[in-house]
Structures are given as C-alpha cells and as structure tokens.
Image (tube, grey):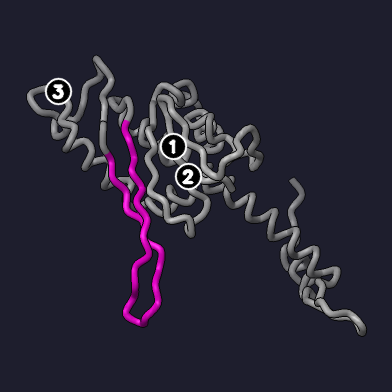
Amino acid sequence: MKEVDTNQLLESLAASGWVIERGETHARLNESGNTLCKLQDGIRKLQGQMDASYAGAILAKLFLANPWLASFEIGLNSSMEYDDRGGYFFCCSVTVSDVEALDGVEMPQDLTNSGTINPIVAADYLENILMDHETSLYDAFSGDRDAMEDLSITVCRARVAPMLQNQTLDGREAFAALFPELEWRITGERSGLDSNHAQVVGSSEAVAPAP
C-alpha cells in the first residue's frame, strides 16, 4: 500500500470553509470543504470497521487464552455521568454471565467448584478482563454513543474455532465469524433491514443500531 503523506493532505484541506456569493441567501462549502466532508464520512466508516476489528481481536484472544471457554454473554450498559464542572461524559460498564465450559478440557482450579465450572467465579474472571475494553466494545457493537442503548452479546467459540490455529488472527475476520449477522459493521454496507435496529438471534447474537 502506498504511504499517504498526511501533512500534505491536511495542507490541501486547510482552505476548507463556507462561502456565500453576492445575491445568494445560503452559504455553501467551497471545493476544499466538500472534499473534507467526503473524507470525514469515509473516516467515520473506517473507524467503525476498526472498532469491530478490535472487538473481534479481543474476544478471540479470550478463547485463545482460555482453552476451556465455550461461550459467554456480555452485557454493555451505557449512561451519561455528570462531572464536577457541570458537564457530563459517556460511561459504559460491562457484565459477563452464562459462562459455559468445553467438555473434557481442564479448567483452572480457581474457576471450579468440586471439579466443575463455577459460573459466578468464571464470570467475574472474564468481566475483570473485559473491563479494560468496555467502551471499545460498546463502540464496536453500537457505533453511536448518543443512542444510549444497553446491549447484550453472546459469544461462541464454535464460530471462531477454525481460525484460532492461525499464526496471525485478523480481528476483522474474527468479528465477521463470531457475528455474521453484524458483518455490516466490518463491510460498512447494510441491506435487507428496514428498521433502525437489528436484533440477531443465534449462537452469537447482538442488539445494535444501524450506522
């Protein structure tokens, strides 16, 4: 891929702005401004793809690091919290539930109870890992913080298992494999759904708004 001179690109857009012609009542973007708007739209689309790729990589890594893990459910709850200066900021929290283990695979003793999985302890273990990525996960599945939605995502090893043997695991491919119903988050193209929200039911499911 040819390297892009970002400084040169930014300099070319430095004149972006609005103009109004004599006799006209509405302002319009100049040529640089039109180019900048198109570039911003493209970057937003690419950022959404990167967010989904990050989520795919993080979730696949959980399966790599925990060979016993079969599936689990993630809950993402969003809110706006007020700060001390009278403003507010986006806040997201993650929960994990319904943790299931693979049959015949040894588990860490501290996650078991009498030789079988302790689902509460296992959920806490996974939750502590995902807490560092909760906002990134929300961005990947929602794409719109202003939507302020609570999301539920079920993640299943079976869908990503074939690629766990690869030397390099691509986050985009992992996300598409885990959530084929949400592949539009990777491709940026969505069709076949008329509503503003998609609810997907299956071994991997999610509730997420359209881009």
What span is colored magenta in the figure? Answer: 72-96
Disc marking residue 116: 3
Question: Residue 138: x percent and y percent?
Answer: 43, 50
Q: Amino acid at mark 1?
A: Ala
Q: In percent of the image, x 31 and y 31: which residue is there? A: 66
**Magenta stretch containing residue 81, yes or no?**
yes
Looking at the rendering, which quadrant does residue 202 occupy?
top left
Q: In percent of the image, x 57 and y 49: which residue is there? A: 48
> Alpha carbon of mark 2 to alpha carbon of mark 1: how far?
8 Å
What crowding class fits label 3: few (fewer than 14 Cα within 10 Å), some (14-19), or many (20 or more)? few
User: Could you tell whether 44 is left or right of 140 in the image?
Assistant: right
Disc marking residue 8: none
Is disc 1 placed on a helix, strand or loop?
loop
For label 1, the residue is 206
The N terminus, quarter of image: top right
Does residue 135 show up? Answer: yes
Question: Residue 139: x percent and y percent?
Answer: 48, 51
Whichever of callouts 1 and 3 sits on the residue coming sooner in the sequence is 3
Q: Amino acid at mark 3?
A: Thr
Is disc 2 placed on a helix, strand or loop?
helix
Question: Residue 194: x percent and y percent?
Answer: 61, 38
For label 2, the residue is 141
- Quick check: marks 2 and 1 in contact, CB under 8 Å? yes
- Quick check: marks 2 and 3 in contact, CB under 8 Å? no
* Residue at the far left in the pictured view: 114
User: Could you tell whether 132 is left or right of 22 in the image?
Assistant: left
- Quick check: marks 1 and 3 in contact, CB under 8 Å? no
Q: In percent of the image, x 47 and y 32: which residue is there? A: 200
